[in-house]
Amino acid sequence: MSNFSKGELSMNAQSTRPQEETHHLLKLKYQSVLGGAKNFLKNRTKTKNRSSCSSIRVNWLITCEAECPHCGLRFRGGNHNTEHIHPISLGGTNNNDNRIQLCKNCNNARNSVMQALLGHPPFSKIFPQEWDAVERYLLWSEITIDEGLSSGARFPEVHELFLEARFAGESPVSGPKKAFGRLSTWGVGEEPNYIGNTAALRSAHTKTTTGTISSFLRRKARLFFDRLFDYESPTNTGQTTSSPLREEVVTGQSAVDESKVLPKVTQGEQKSNQELSETEVSILRQKWNDHALNCLAQNDGSFFVGDFWQLVSDERIARGLSWRSFERALGVTHKAAMPSKVRQILEQIGLNFIFEKTENGYLIVEASEEE
Ligand SMILES: [Zn+2]
């Protein structure tokens, strides 16, 4: 785990004390969920059938350019599916109130958290001895949906597992702007209603005069900054503070030979006005997609984040581009940490994966389907 996320987690733990009281209140708030799970595990009840969000609703989500409530990834093609917030394997129902559309990778990461805490179903075999863990997982699962992902820090040990599996230990750089809440809270034809949507875009969606003016001003500001970056002096584009090389050192990735790459980085900055064409970007994504699928199909079905970033780095050097313009063309957040950049690239190519923390850095592993 990187220093950054360690610090952040301990900060969260501090700011959420006293934990006991918070947990007590949450147990009251979600007593029907907890009671249902307890009865289900005690009586070894048969699990309910699960089903996905209807295709009419899915079409509406796509029309709205809806995003994942956890990570803000825009739903496209098959990159999203239906999460049962109170898992079916713990007695959850298939009702709209218990379902929400998430991106597949967030859904898989939630599932991996449950596996890490509780093992594999049937969970009646761990009842009642592991009830505390079941309870913590269920409360974490509910509040991260009802109050936004960051509220999960109230259960630090659960939340850390999620941040590791989904974001390689980092908190997401930005949250959703156009996400929808539980299926019971919205209908086809309605605007994105998720409580965790950032306020700026919610007001842009409101068709009031102020909304129109503020979105106009935002557009103006965007254009201004776009111009600023384009005309920025090439010597100013070198970002030593967020250099991917530095991040690799911090996160313990040793794949890059610095002596080989460092001089190239500075040379590359001089050509920062060059751009990658959309065609080149698609070719690169295809190439990385093939590579990732190959890695997952071979050996132990995984690859290191640092090794993948080396491939990206090589392509940039070959083109003599600055990190800023290269990452901008790829649609990757320049200021993000290296594993986050890898995540963004893998999400763009539609890979189904989670991170796995190891002594030698983070691995990308193929995600297993929901149990
Ligand atoms: Zn997501």
Image (spheres, grey):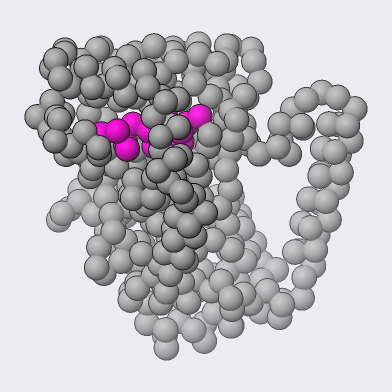
Q: Position of residue 149 (x, y in %)?
A: 49, 40
Q: Position of residue 126 (x, y in %)?
A: 12, 33
Quarter residue 302 falls in: bottom left
Residue at point 51%, 29% (across, down): 146
Instruction: Give the residue drawn at x 89%, y 35%.
Output: 213
Residue 47 seen in this snapshot: yes
Front-lying residue, 223 or 3? 3
In this rendering, is residue 289 above or below 310? above
Q: Is residue 33 above or below residue 179?
A: above
Picture coordinates of residue 223, whole percent (x, y) = 81, 51
Which stretch appears magenta? Answer: 134-146
Residue nearest the viewer, comparing 291 with 100: 100
Residue 139 inside the magenta-drawn segment: yes
Q: Quadrant of the C terminus?
A: top left
Comparing 80 with 275, the one in front is 80
Quadrant for the N terminus in the image? bottom left
Examine the image and state in which quarter residue 36 appears. Answer: top left
Vertical arrangement, residue 20 with respect to residue 68, above or below: below
Whole-percent x, y for residue 161 in the image: 33, 49
Work out whether 24 lies above or below 228.
Answer: above
Any magenta on residue 118? no
Residue drawn at (71%, 31%), measured in percent from left and top?
A: 202
The structure residue drawn at horizontal position 17% and vertical position 37%, both measured from the top left corner, is 130
- From this viewpoint, is residue 165 visible? no
- Would you say 166 lies left or right of 87 here? right
Main SS type for the magenta part? helix
The image shows a total of numbered marks equal to: 0
Residue farthest to the left, as pictured: 125
